[in-house]
Amino acid sequence: MVTRRAVALRLAVLAPVAGLLVGCGGSEPADAPAGQSQEKEVSASFTDGGVQAVTYDQAKVPAGSGATVKTGSADGRTTTTLTVRGLLPNTTYGAHAHVNPCGSTGDAAGAHYQFNQDPVKPSVDPAFANPQNEIWLDLTTDAQGNGTATSTNEWVFPADRRAQSVIIHEMATMTAPGKAGTAGKRPACMTVPF
């Protein structure tokens, strides 16, 4: 026969173990099963020497300006939205998902994330460097320096190969052979756990 005291004692012993197991779960959610939505959102202000959101050129992306990246995958497609605030007014920027997190220079973010990878680096072949195979988020800011761009791709990230940042480039993305995917210098970067 199990008494109330025995049940209470078992619960008292198991509660810390349950808390420990919950605490070991990490901060990243598990991959959602196929067909279910998985969304992530990161919002930060750009700082010189920052970690989450870095400005490498304050003349193009002023310190204190900011961005929000929201990304989600469901039903075989990935949708990503970039919203910026406080950038230069009435200015066109290129923006893309990149393979590495932000670092001390814009080059630390590596190449554009490509679902189907170009064997030639740097990738300037429109067969690979295009908005269907990469996440392109080019935008033009309004008079206050605010803007939004959304990209929807007909694929989801493989569990072992995800983009890790969004780079804001100094100009719109080119599409011609030999130039495809290029958008000039990298004045800012935001680390995003796609």
Image: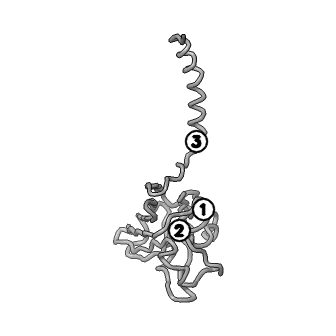
Question: Which image quarter: residue 68?
Answer: bottom left
Residue labelled with disc 3:
25
Q: Say above or below: 139 vs 67.
A: below
Which residue is the extreme one toward the bottom? Answer: 177
SS category of the residue bearing label 3: loop
Closer-to-camera residue (24/50): 24
Considering only order in the chain, which callout, 3 or 1, is on the residue closer to the N terminus? 3
Q: Nearer the viewer, mark 1 or mark 3?
A: 3
Is the N terminus in the top left, top right, bottom left or bottom right quadrant? top right
Please tell me the numbered disc located at residue 71. Answer: none
Disc 1 residue type (three-letter): Pro
Question: Which image quarter: residue 55?
Answer: bottom right
Query: Crowding near pointer 1: few (<14 within 10 Å), some, many (20+)?
Result: many
Query: Crowding near pointer 2: few (<14 within 10 Å), some, many (20+)?
Result: many
- Residue sitting at 55 percent across and 86 percent down? 179
Considering only order in the chain, which callout, 3 or 2, is on the residue closer to the N terminus? 3
Query: Crowding near pointer 3: few (<14 within 10 Å), some, many (20+)?
Result: few
Closer-to-camera residue (40/147): 40
Residue labelled with disc 2:
97
On the image, the x and y values in percent for residue 132 come to: 48, 75
SS category of the residue bearing label 1: loop
Residue labelled with disc 1:
101
Disc 3 residue type (three-letter): Gly
On the image, the x and y values in percent for residue 73 come to: 46, 60
Q: CA distance from mark 2 to mark 3?
A: 27 Å
Q: Say above or below: 44 vs 109.
A: above
Q: Nearer the viewer, mark 2 or mark 3?
A: 3
Closer-to-camera residue (189/114): 114
Label 1 with label 2: CB-CB less than 8 Å = no
Which residue is the extreme one toward the front? Answer: 1
Disc 2 residue type (three-letter): Ala
- Residue sitting at 61 percent across and 64 percent down? 100
